[in-house]
Amino acid sequence: MKVGVTLRNMGPQSQPEIMLAGARLAEDLALDSVWITDHIAIPPDDAEGSGGRYTDPFTTLAWLGGATSRIGLGVGVLVVPYRPPLPTAKAIATVQELTGGRLLLGLGVGWMDAEFRALGVDRRQRGQLTEEFLEFLASCFSDTVVQSRGQPMLFEPKPAMPPVYLGGQAKHALPRAQRFGHGWLPMVRNPEQLAEALAGFEGPVTAMVGLPLEDAGASREQLRRYTALGVERLVCAVRYDTLASYEAQLRRLADIAKAV
């Protein structure tokens, strides 16, 4: 079982010194990966906890990649319909190339009405736009000549395609993941909830979960149960206000992960 952790690229915890120290600490503790999230336009009435402050995921992961050497760099999830396909594929390839193949790519369809309106994107088309992007992204990483809006072009750099995990509810995400040959990135409360959703799915799973880190025995037991379900990576979602709080939780998580 690979064990990663969330890193807040939102709110006051997204100050550069906190994010940088947090990512380096996670690497020093031999955790598998750090994961950030994606929002572009937060309305004032939905800014609790973030104050509307989110750093861009591609810029943030590239920056963290330059300050670390081993740890995986995940986004969970990048909202596909918010961005045009070609520049997005270029950003993905660039981060993957410059970080030595450490990108872990969670992709989702999005949900926030206000954000879609601010970006001028029809929310009703988000599923279709996501599937079109998945087809285009695969072409960018596999074909010598790529077609974009009927224009043949060369797509470089062309590193190994990062692993892709589709976020979202099982009834939508799992068929899409199965069809495109990708993994699933669910947010789950407990192993029982995940077991029910996974029936019949054979792809890789990275699960975002909360662990009772103050109870090492209970956390280890949950890790064992997720492992038994075939989860390849668990991303522990942690809440923190200060770097000291983040460090304390990371040290508990690292100790728990070593014992499983």
Image: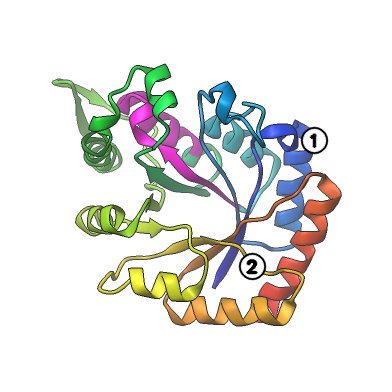
Q: How many marks?
A: 2
- Residue beneath the point at 34% across and 40% down: 109
Q: Nearer the viewer, residue 47 or 62?
A: 47
Residue that numbered label 2 is attached to: 211
Question: Which corner quadrant holds the C terminus?
Answer: bottom right
Residue 122, given in percent of the width and then of the height, sits at 28, 24
The disc placed on residue 17 is 1
Identified at 51% across, 81% down, the residue is 225
Q: Is residue 123 above or below residue 118?
A: below
Q: Which residues are magenta?
A: 72-95
Q: Could you tell me if residue 156 is visible in this image?
A: no
Residue at x 39%, y 53% (from the top left corner): 165
Q: Identify whether 159 is placed above or below 257.
A: above
Q: Is residue 219 magenta?
A: no
Crowding around mark 2 (Cα neighbors within 10 Å: few <14, some 14 to 19, many 20+) is: many
Color encoding of the figure: rainbow
51 relative position to 172: left or right: right
- Residues 130 and 31: in front is 130
Label 1 residue SS: helix
Is residue 89 part of the magenta span, yes or no? Answer: yes
The Cα–Cα distance between marks 1 and 2, rounded to whole angstroms, is 26 Å
Q: Amino acid at mark 2?
A: Leu
Q: Is residue 53 left or right of residue 17?
A: left
- Residue 142 drawn at (x, y percent): 25, 43
**Closer to the observer: label 1 or label 2?**
2
Pick out the residue farthest to the left: 150
Check the picture and name the quadrant holding the N terminus: bottom right
Residue 232 in the image: state x and y as whole percent.
46, 69
In the displayed structure image, the side of residue 99 where residue 144 appears, left or right: left
Which amino acid type is marked by label 1?
Glu
